[in-house]
Image (cartoon, helix red, strand yellow):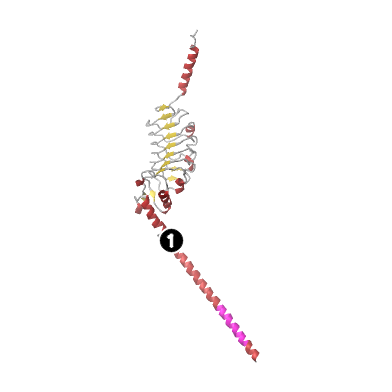
Amino acid sequence: MFPSGSPRSLSLVFLLGMASQGISCPSRCSCQYLEVNCTGQQLQEFPVDIPLDTRQLILAANNVSYLPPVELSFLADLVYLDCRKNLLGDDLDFTFIGVARLVYLDLSFNNLSQVTFSTFSHLLSLVVLKISDNPNLVAIEKDAFANNTWLRHLDVSRTGLTFLDTSTVRDLPNLRLLGLSDNLWHCNCSFLDFITWMMESDVHFPDADNITCYTPAGLRALRMPAAEAQLHFSCLTQLHKQDYVFLGLVGFCIFLAGTMAAWLAGVCAVIYETHASKGEEEEEEEEEDTAT
């Protein structure tokens, strides 16, 4: 016979053992309350056995090249994801469809090449997004952040971007900080609207001294305030070759129209004079016939 209370004690030990087996932690990662940290573990793939209640996942400084959407969707409570310094690239569309509660996402120091509407459209709660230091990032679609209306901190510094549509960031009502430094900005007339928005916006631009034009050669290394003044002069006051051609055509059309109008007026005058003189001659003839 077991001593009094032993069955209950054994049951408690059994339950604790089962619970400890249910608490998993990925190999080579450290786990504590609601956090999994796999920093610098040379991981080649997304780790398995991540606890489903994880709120914070750190995968920084690894060799992960792919984030599996299905595995990520199991982490429905995830609010913080740090994937900086990995090999993520190419297509991330619909990757984050199952982690809609994500507030912080760091994808800096990767190989991203583009950002489309489908990349982050499901992250309705996103507040901080870092996609800086992606040298292959050359395109961000106009409506890429249309659904990320809570976004306050966006960093696209040190990428391959040459252009960014003004509406892409202007329509973010809560944006407070925007990193744009050390990009390959092409400061032409199409970019003037964006530069003007920068000058008039309440958004803070960190490292503003390094937000400069890369092309054309005449504006190389010019900071945005100076570039705006140059572009206002060249785009809004100076005329280009096509403008002179257009004005020449307009002038020619006006001259031709004036010439035609004058010719028609002259023809009408001649016809009128001819009819008038004929009328006078007929009246004189009638008077002479009457007199005789």
Residue at the front extreme, as displayed: 202
The percent coordinates of residue 202 (x first, y second) are: 42, 46
Q: Which residue is mark 1?
A: 243
Quarter-of-image position of residue 242 = bottom left
**Residue beneath the point at 43% across and 61% down:** 243
Residue at the top extreme, as displayed: 1
The residue carrying pointer 1 sits among few (fewer than 14), some (14 to 19) or many (20 or more) residues within 10 Å by Cα, namely few
**What secondary structure is marked by label 1?**
helix
Is residue 89 magenta-colored? no
Is residue 277 magenta-colored? yes
- In the image, is residue 202 above or below residue 267? above
Main SS of the magenta part reads: helix
Residue at the bottom extreme, as displayed: 292
The percent coordinates of residue 50 (x first, y second) are: 45, 28
Which one is nearer the viewer's eye here, 114 or 185? 185
The magenta stretch is 270-285
**Residue beneath the point at 43% across and 37% down:** 105
Quarter in which the C terminus is drawn = bottom right
The amino acid at mark 1 is: Asp
The percent coordinates of residue 99 (x first, y second) are: 48, 34
Q: Is residue 287 visible?
A: yes
**Residue beneath the point at 54% across and 76% down:** 267
Label total for image: 1
The percent coordinates of residue 100 (x first, y second) are: 49, 36
149 lies left or right of 30: right
Q: Is residue 45 visible?
A: no
Quarter-of-image position of residue 44 = top left
- In the image, is residue 252 above or below residue 102? below
